[in-house]
């Protein structure tokens, strides 16, 4: 049964300003708004560190990926940037204080009508000049008392953007987890196919040797031996190709975990195959869980809140605002003339006409709110379709696995019977080759189908928004 993951709980709690996001104050974050470390995706997630000095399980690889994969770091940087935006919006609740200090040099040259300029360009008679140094220091304080709700709307919009950023981080983190699971299952599936192909090579060699022995005994033709050689070569070629696929899959898993592609990973045996318990809850219950847990739906709803807050912020720009200000200035001229002046003022600003700019800003914000509302509904519908599609895919994968197991059992018996009949001289080599080919295909399908079930289970958990619980279920 799915429960609320720590990351999902974090997203819910993060809707309360100042709760769960608050970190220690610092020079760059005096309000303590910026989160320090990402929330865990699952309850059992290990802290970041070096690779464990033991064979790695799937949860180990997931923990490494969440620490090292660049996608999570990119998304987390966006969360911290959005948190800084909260601090910027809240700055409107505090006054602004400006201090200006500085000297200025002033020179005055003057001459009256009695003076003249000689041929050298010098003023003769009736002239005067003066130099002085003015020094001033001014301290100004300004505070916005009322702005028609714009300040509160901007804070609300910033909080909504932070919720959206957190949800997008959660979505990216769950995507990283699914990528690791898919790459892990692909590698193990190819290894299982390799084991099946080794068995196919051994069976093909037995058939070739049997045909060669019967030819030597004069009871079979050269065509049987040549067909046996061809079948063995084809089985060996398939084995070589599978081993190449294993190397590629291993590199893909390493990269998914945030490691160099040439990293050699020592993997522990996989956990027992899940039984598909999620199917027992039914598609309707899983879709309801998705609407509550999926990070992209949380982000879409936060974007709607942000857009609605922006509408109110634009509306406030056309309303009167009231500010209070106080300024004190100290000045001196050549240290001989000192002056101290103070001003306190209350100002009312009333927008009258701006070329209808404000009206169009409001119209644009309302259109954006309508767009985000439609996108949120689209996201919700797509989430339901994703859950249902993956629900059907898991059901089909489980059914296919049952069929594949039955197919291997019957193909194994048929191949053994065909080999015995040919050895006894009552069956043809063509029958043996057909049975051998059917067994090889059945083995490969079984190996692939088992890991198809594992991947489908993870994809359904991802579609619901609870892939962290699926990973915790495999921790040992």
Image (cartoon, rainbow, N blue to C red):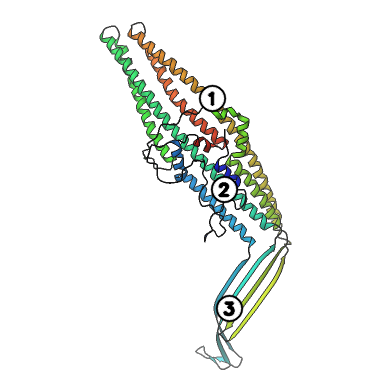
How much space separates mark 2 and mark 3, taking CA atoms?
Answer: 46 Å
- Work out whether mark 2 precedes mark 3 in sequence or the reverse, and give the earlier one: 3
Between 355 and 344, the one nearer to me in the picture: 344
User: Which residue is found at the position 55% from the left and 79% from the top?
Assistant: 104
Between 115 and 146, the one nearer to me in the picture: 146
Q: Position of residue 367 (x, y in %)?
A: 68, 47
Judge whether residue 415 can be spotted in this image: yes
User: Which residue is found at the position 65% from the left and 53% from the top?
Assistant: 156
Circle 2 residue: 165
Judge whether residue 428 can be spotted in this image: no
Q: Position of residue 213 (x, y in %)?
A: 27, 11
Q: Nearer the viewer, mark 3 or mark 1?
A: 1
- Work out whether mark 2 precedes mark 1 in sequence or the reverse, and give the earlier one: 2
Neighbor class of circle 2 (other Cα within 10 Å; few <14, some 14-19, many 20+) is many
How much space separates mark 3 and mark 1, taking CA atoms?
Answer: 82 Å
* Quadrant where the N terminus is found in the figure: top right
Circle 3 residue: 136
Circle 1 residue: 396
């Amino acid at each position: 049964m799915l429960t609320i993951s720590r990351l999902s709980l974090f997203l819910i709690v993060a809707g309360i300003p100042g709760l769960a996001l608050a970190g220690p104050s610092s020079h760059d974050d005096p309000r303590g708004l910026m989160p320090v470390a990402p929330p865990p995706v699952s309850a059992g997630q290990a802290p970041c560190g070096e690779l464990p000095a033991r064979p790695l399980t799937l949860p180990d690889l997931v923990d490494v990926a969440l620490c090292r994969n660049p996608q999570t770091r990119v998304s987390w940087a966006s969360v911290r940037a959005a948190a800084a935006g909260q601090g910027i919006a809240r700055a409107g609740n505090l006054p602004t204080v400006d201090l200006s200090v500085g000297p200025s040099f002033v020179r005055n040259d003057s001459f009256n009508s009695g003076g003249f300029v000689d041929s050298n360009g010098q003023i003769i008679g009736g002239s005067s000049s003066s130099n002085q140094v003015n020094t001033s220091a001014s301290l100004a304080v300004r505070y916005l008392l009322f702005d028609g709700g714009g300040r509160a709307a901007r804070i609300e919009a910033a909080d909504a953007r932070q919720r959206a950023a957190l949800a997008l981080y959660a979505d990216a983190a769950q995507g990283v987890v699914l990528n690791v699971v898919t790459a892990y299952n692909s590698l193990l599936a190819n290894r299982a196919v390799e084991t099946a192909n080794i068995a196919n090579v051994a069976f093909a060699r037995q058939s070739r040797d049997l045909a060669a022995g019967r030819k030597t005994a004069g009871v079979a033709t050269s065509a049987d031996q040549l067909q046996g050689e061809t079948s063995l070569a084809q089985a060996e070629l398939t084995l070589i190709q599978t081993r190449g696929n294993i190397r590629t899959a291993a590199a893909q898993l390493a990269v998914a975990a945030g490691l160099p592609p040439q990293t050699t990973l020592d993997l522990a045996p996989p956990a027992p195959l899940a039984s598909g318990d999620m199917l027992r809850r039914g598609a309707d219950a899983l879709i309801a869980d998705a609407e509550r847990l999926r990070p992209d739906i949380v982000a879409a709803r936060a974007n709607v809140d942000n857009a609605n807050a922006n509408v109110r912020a634009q509306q406030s720009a056309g309303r009167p605002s009231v500010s209070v200000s106080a300024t004190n200035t100290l000045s001196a001229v050549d240290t001989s003339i000192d002056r101290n002046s103070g001003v306190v003022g209350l100002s009312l600003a009333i927008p009258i006409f701006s070329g209808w700019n404000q009206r169009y800003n409001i119209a644009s914000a309302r259109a954006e709110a309508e767009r985000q509302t439609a996108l949120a509904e689209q996201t919700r519908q797509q989430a339901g379709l994703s859950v249902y599609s993956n629900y059907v895919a898991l059901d089909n994968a489980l059914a296919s696995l049952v069929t594949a197991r039955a197919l291997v059992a019957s193909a194994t018996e048929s191949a053994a019977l065909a080999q015995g009949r040919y050895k006894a001289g009552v069956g043809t080599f063509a029958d043996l080759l057909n049975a051998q080919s059917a067994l090889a295909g059945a083995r490969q399908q079984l190996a692939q189908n088992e890991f198809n079930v594992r991947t489908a289970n993870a994809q359904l958990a991802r579609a619901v928004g609870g892939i962290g619980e699926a990973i915790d279920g495999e921790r040992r």
